[in-house]
Image (cartoon, rainbow, N blue to C red):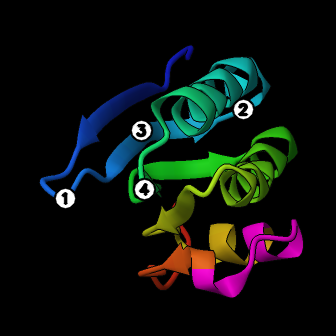
């Protein structure tokens, strides 16, 4: 991803954690999509957490990518969760079709 960096790690329970930093825009879309699809289709953890605590903004393409990742995860029996989104991002993700139970630990206020 361009100016955005991503940390990928595994929790002690086998949860795969993807933690992007910065703002995700159209230049990051292909890399984010590839990372999520590879994780869901090939790595296939029981749980995949995308930790958004350090994400300042998401463009519409990346919002749609995260919403689609939740659906793809359901199809492949991978529970996908979006943790620590800021309230504005959580609202936009919900508008994009992400179910409320996928949005965990929403941070009040916006980070821009």
Please state the extent of the stretch shown in magenta in the rendering. Answer: 93-101
Identify the mark nearer the N-term, 4 or 3.
Answer: 3
Identify the mark nearer the N-term, 1 or 3.
Answer: 1
Residue identified by numbered label 2: 25
Q: Tell me the element at label 4.
A: loop
Residue identified by numbered label 4: 46
Find the distance from the CA under tag 4 to the CA under tag 1. Answer: 9 Å
Q: Tell me the element at label 2.
A: loop
User: Residue 10's x, y, as percent?
Assistant: 23, 42
Whether residue 112 is visible, yes or no, is no
* Residue 68 among those drawn in magenta: no
Q: Tell me the element at label 1.
A: loop
Frontmost of labels 4 and 3 is 4
User: Residue 19's x, y, as percent?
Assistant: 38, 43
Residue that extends furthest to the left in the rendered view of this protein: 12
Residue identified by numbered label 1: 13
Find the distance from the CA under tag 2 to the CA under tag 4. Answer: 28 Å
Identify the mark nearer the N-term, 4 or 1.
Answer: 1
Q: Please state which of residues 46 and 16 is positioned toward the viewer in this rendering.
A: 46
Above or below — where is 38 with respect to 15?
A: above
Find the distance from the CA under tag 1 to the CA under tag 3. Answer: 23 Å
Whether residue 33 is visible, yes or no, is yes
User: Residue 50's x, y, as percent?
Assistant: 47, 52
Residue identified by numbered label 3: 21
- Mark 2 and mark 4 residues within 8 Å of each other at the beta carbon: no
**Which residue is rendered at x = 44% and y = 38% of the image?**
20
- Mark 1 and mark 2 residues within 8 Å of each other at the beta carbon: no
**Which residue is rendered at x = 67% and y = 49% of the image?**
76
Q: Is residue 15 left or right of residue 89?
A: left
């Amino acid at each position: 991803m361009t100016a955005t960096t991503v940390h990928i790690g595994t929790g002690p329970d086998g949860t795969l954690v993807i933690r992007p930093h910065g703002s995700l825009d159209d230049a990051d879309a292909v890399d984010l999509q590839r990372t999520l699809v590879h994780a869901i289709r090939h790595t296939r953890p029981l749980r995949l957490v995308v930790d958004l605590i350090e994400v300042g903004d998401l463009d519409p393409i990346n919002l749609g990518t995260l919403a689609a990742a939740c659906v793809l995860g359901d199809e492949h029996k991978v529970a996908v969760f979006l943790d620590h989104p800021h309230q504005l991002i959580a609202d936009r993700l919900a508008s994009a079709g992400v179910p409320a139970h996928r949005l965990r630990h929403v941070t009040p206020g916006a980070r821009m």
